[in-house]
Amino acid sequence: MSRFLALIPVIALIAVLAAPLRANESAIQSVIEDQIEAFLNDDLTSAFAHASPMIQQLFGTPGRFGQMVRDSYPMVWRPDEVTFLPMDDAKARPVQPVILRDSAGALHILDYEMIQTDEGWKINGVRLRRAPAGAV
């Protein structure tokens, strides 16, 4: 019993330290959901607002950004289903893996790299993972 009592402060510390990670994960997922919803509604201005300053500078306008997403990431432009995997926050920047099902039923895993700005979390890039060998 005394061992258990000795672990209570450790368990409490872990819970306190994990709370910000869960809050970040929730906030990050909300940004990604909001951007996907903006694409579904053809609201390029709102979708562009969720991109990091670097991405905004790279594409310059919501229209150019939207065209890139339509052409290069059609599964992001019009997903049928969105599922969040556990976030990887062990890297320099948090990465939120997302499974997207496209209109043909194919599954795609994308890694959303996120950055914290004065305006909140922003999407700093999206990388499509390669399918494992033998996957269909």
Image: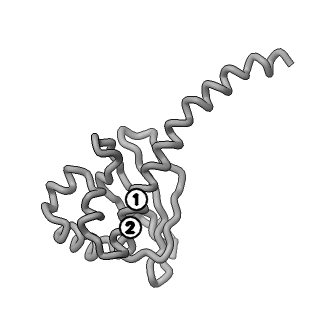
Q: Residue at x 29, y 71 (%)?
A: 43
* The one of 13 and 110 positioned closer to us in this rendering: 13
Give x and y (percent) for residue 97: 46, 56
Give x and y (percent) for residue 7: 73, 21
| 83 horizontally vs 48: left or right | right
Q: Residues within 10 Å of mark 1 (few under 14, many from 20)?
A: many
Query: How many labels were placed on the picture?
Result: 2
Q: Residue at x 50, y 73 (%)?
A: 81
Q: Residue at x 29, y 42 (%)?
A: 117
Give x and y (percent) for residue 19: 55, 36
* The one of 135 and 60 positioned closer to us in this rendering: 60
* Three-letter code for the amino acid on which mark 1 is drawn: Ile
Give x and y (percent) for residue 124: 29, 52
Instruction: Identify the residue under disc 2.
Output: 36
Element at label 2: helix
Q: Is residue 124 above or below residue 135?
A: above
**Quadrant of image for the N terminus:** top right
For residue 59, which quarter of the picture? bottom left
Give the label on residue 32, or none.
Answer: 1
- Direction right: furthest residue: 1
Task: Measure the alpha-carbon separation of dots 2 and 1.
Answer: 6 Å
Q: Residues within 10 Å of mark 2 (few under 14, many from 20)?
A: many
- Marks 1 and 2: in contact by CB < 8 Å? yes
Give the label on residue 130, or none.
Answer: none
Q: Is residue 74 above or below residue 50?
A: below
| 15 horizontally vs 5: left or right | left
Q: Residue at x 36, y 42 (%)?
A: 93
Element at label 1: helix
Colour scheme in the image?
A: one colour
Q: Is residue 49 above or below residue 39?
A: above
Q: Is residue 35 above or below residue 121?
A: below
